[in-house]
Image (spheres, rainbow, N blue to C red):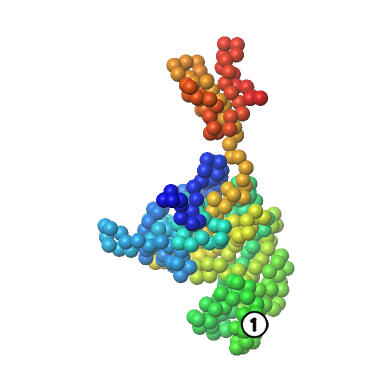
Amino acid sequence: MNWLLPEYLADALPNEAARIERQRRTVLDLFRVHGYELVMPPLIEYLDSLLTGSGQDLRLRTFKLVDQVSGRTLGVRADITPQVARIDAHLLNREGVTRLCYCDSVLHTMPATISASREPIQVGAELYGHAGYEADLEVVRLMAAALSSTGAAASRIDLGHVGIFRALAEAAGLNADQLDVALTLLQSKDVPGLEEFCASLAEPYRSAFLRLPTLYGDAAVLDTAAAVLPVLAPVSAALADLKRLADALPELPLSFDLSDLRGYHYHNGIVFAAYHPGSAAAVALGGRYDGAGRDFGRARPATGFSMDMRVVAQIVGGDASNGAILSPYAGQDAGLMAAIAKLRRAGETVVEILPGQGVPEGPRCDRRLVFVGQQWTVETIG
């Protein structure tokens, strides 16, 4: 049984691989016309560099090994975003706005969900050097456009802001242990557990934490939040940022969830997640992570998103091919070779029947090349 793959790893067979590759090209072309430059970080880096600023959650998801050259600990990347932040801060060293994109495999020690692969194909876009909400607006629009371009348009895009929880926790005087407990309870929507945790907190913070799980829905929830949460400058600023995005994106199916704290130790501003009926989990995730690159020598404002092309390909399904053309074996037939070459230059798939072979079982052939009237002509099969 040595040929079996480890759990949560799988080969991409021809049809799925074709879908993934077509969608990859579509998304990267979309990024390109929006000014995002492609980068290709290495699969393995020194562990310290790979986990810089990423938080404990990424550390637990990262495979580790010893470099036989240096003797130092290496990590197999579990997320490309920190690598791109390193490239922006340390290698490109630009002063203004920089837009970068990427697409490649990452590896997780454990799957993110029970149906996820441990080897996602992560595609994403990151915008560095602009701290204003306009950058978040661009990235949310780009995320929605990327999903639509693949045929997996978002049915809902949730927006949140980790600054709200951060401000409440600081004002309530939560210590590190209490902060971790509150995060876990809110992320799991454990209302009974949250009520027990908040019993010892002073007002108005006790009520504020208990209200957070209920503050989700359409844009009206932002007005509700402003009315029921304590008047703190960071909370007001966060709600104002969310309101500006809501007003600027009437074309998108926005909703709001003020207790969405995924990536809390990494993100420090607006966060967002896109959903599709074909997936129980979010199909794209992103947010602001200002200060990216600080440990690489330059703190930079940053916002971006990523998604897994394997998940998108599963959602879209179907046959990615446009059908192929079946051709007799060309051999030394100059006319047939020229006809085949012309079709291939036009982007058509042409499959030759090798001598002694029948119709191939590979690409779906719905047309064939036939010699009619002294020329090679394509006709529909059947």
- Give percent across and percent down for residue 129: 48, 60
Say if residue 290 shows up in the picture.
yes
The crowding category of the residue bearing disc 1, from other C-alpha atoms within 10 Å (few below 14, some 14 to 19, many at least 20), is some
Q: Residue at x 40, y 54 (%)?
A: 43
Q: Residue at x 51, y 65 (%)?
A: 289
Q: Residue furthest right?
A: 220
Say if residue 125 shows up in the picture.
no
Secondary structure of the residue carrying numbered label 1: helix
Q: Residue furthest front?
A: 1
- Give percent across and percent down for residue 292: 45, 64
- Give percent across and percent down for residue 183: 56, 75
Q: Residue furthest top?
A: 374
* Viewer-proximal residue among 381 and 148: 381
Provide the residue designation for mark 1: 195
Amino acid type of disc 1?
Glu
Q: Going by the image, does 191 lie left or right of 48?
A: right
* Viewer-proximal residue among 93 and 374: 374
Q: Compared to 198, does 307 lie above or below?
A: above
Q: Residue at x 65, y 80 (%)?
A: 192
- Give percent across and percent down for residue 275: 64, 58
